[in-house]
Every structure is written in structure tokens, then in C-alpha cells.
Image (cartoon, rainbow, N blue to C red):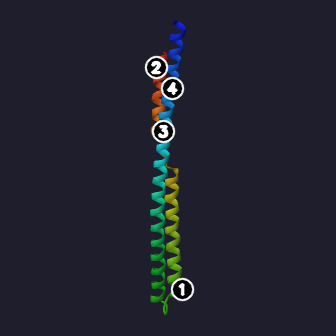
Amino acid sequence: MSEAGLLGSIKRLLSTLTSIASTRLELLANELYEERLHLEQMLLYFFSALICFAMTIMLLTVFIVVLFWDTHRLAVLGGLSALFLVLGLLVVSRLQKIMRTKSKLFSVSLAELGRDREQLGGSNG
């Protein structure tokens, strides 16, 4: 009878562990899906804004060059080129700062796995 009780306990333990692993994998899959949706949305808005700003900059540059065509066209082209170079460097600097920021991806899954580890360790000690 004790063997059957031990076997039953082992089966319940394995069932519980499988259930925990399944729940954690589902949570991980949900986090991946949410992160992908977030990234897709950010990219869509980023490229839409990029196209609008690029057209604005191009048209504004042409407007300013045409406005100063007879007097200072080379100075205006040089000045605008320098301005766009500085702005581009600022954007690259900001992008590098964002890239160094730690992602929150899998933070919920890792926290849950930590709680599971504590609970399993606490029941053994």
C-alpha cells in the first residue's frame, strides 16, 4: 500500500511540475507575442514619421535654396548640410542610448520562475 501511495505522490508531483512548466511556457509565449506586436507598431509609426519628415526636409531645403538662388545658394546649401549632419548625429546618439537600455522582455516569466524556485526550495528545506 505504501508503494502505491509513493507512486501516486510521484505522479501528482510530476503532474504539478508539468502544469507549472506549461503555465510558464504559455506566459513566455504571450510575452513574446506582445513584444512582437509592440515592435511592429513602433516600426510602422517610425517609418511613417520618417517618410513625412524626409519629405518635409527635402521640400524645405529646396524652398530655401530657391529663395536664396541669386545671392547665397552655396552658403545656404553648406549651412543646411551642416545642420542636417548635426541633427543626424544627435539622432544616432539618442538611438545608441536607447539600445543600451535593458529590455523588459521575459521579466514576468523570470519573476514567476524565481517564485517557483523559492517555493520548491522552501518545501524541501
Depth-wise, is mark 1 or mark 2 nearer the camera?
2
Q: Amino acid at mark 2?
A: Gly
Name which residue lies at 48% across and 91% down: 71
Give SS at disc 3: helix
Location of mark 1 (residue): 74
Disc on the earlier residue, 3 or 2: 3
Above or below 110: residue 98? below
User: Mark 1 and mark 4: span between their CA atoms?
Assistant: 73 Å
Q: Are marks 2 and 4 in contact (CB under 8 Å)?
A: no
Give SS at disc 2: helix
Disc on the earlier residue, 2 or 4: 4
User: Mark 3 and mark 2: span between their CA atoms?
Assistant: 25 Å
User: Mark 3 and mark 1: span between their CA atoms?
Assistant: 61 Å
User: Mark 2 and mark 4: span between their CA atoms?
Assistant: 15 Å
User: Which disc is residue 26 wearing?
Assistant: 3
Name which residue lies at 52% across and 19% down: 11
Location of mark 4 (residue): 17
Residue 31 in the image, given as x and y percentages of width and height: 47, 44
Q: Amino acid at mark 4?
A: Leu
Above or below 68: residue 98? above
Give SS at disc 4: helix
Badge 2: few (under 14), some or many (20 or more) residues near its Cα, within 10 Å? few
Disc on the earlier residue, 1 or 4: 4
Location of mark 2 (residue): 122
